[in-house]
Amino acid sequence: MDAPPPFECWSEGGCLYRCAPCGSTFRHSVAFWKHVAEFHRLDPADFGRLFPRPRVKKVAMRCDECGQEITFDRGKMEAHMIRRHDGMTLRQYYDKHIAKRGTF
């Protein structure tokens, strides 16, 4: 039986974002939008108008707490946990559900 991935790898998610102006890629939306703000000095709305659809790969997962399908992306998972599960952190979710699995 394989061990689950380490938290640091799992929490990155499975999606992929590409920055149209410079070609940089990111594994989660938090890092992508931070890059857009810091390097290109654009807010998300302006960037979205200029360069629609920065997510080039979408991966979904089912939340083990409520069964809802959510995007397997760090920002989307964090937002889901805050809204639906009383602010549960990704680390708490991982420890409760992912780390206890034999495989991912």
Image (tube, rainbow, N blue to C red):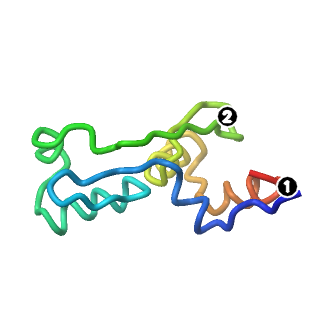
Residue at point 15%, 47% (across, down): 47
Tag of residue 58: none
Q: Amino acid at mark 1?
A: Gly
Decide if residue 22 is on the left or right side of residue 87: left
Decide if residue 17 is on the left or right side of residue 42: right
Residue at point 59%, 58% (across, down): 90
User: Which label lies toward us, 1 or 2?
Assistant: 1
Residue 92 to residue 45: above or below: below
Residue at point 63%, 63% (across, down): 91
The quarter in which the N terminus is drawn is bottom right
Decide if residue 27 is on the left or right side of residue 77: left
- Which of the two residues, 82 or 46, is positioned nearer the viewer here? 46
Residue at point 71%, 40% (across, down): 64
Q: Residue furthest right?
A: 1
- Neighbour class for label 1 at 10 Å: few (<14), some, many (≥20)? few
Secondary structure category for the residue under label 1: loop
Q: Where is residue 63 shown, x and y percent of the image?
A: 65, 39
How far is mark 1 from mark 2, CA to CA?
Answer: 21 Å
Q: Does label 1 or label 2 sit earlier along the sequence?
A: 2
Q: Where is residue 99 shown, x and y percent of the image?
A: 77, 60
Decide if residue 11 is on the left or right side of residue 45: right
Secondary structure category for the residue under label 2: loop
- State the residue position of label 2: 66
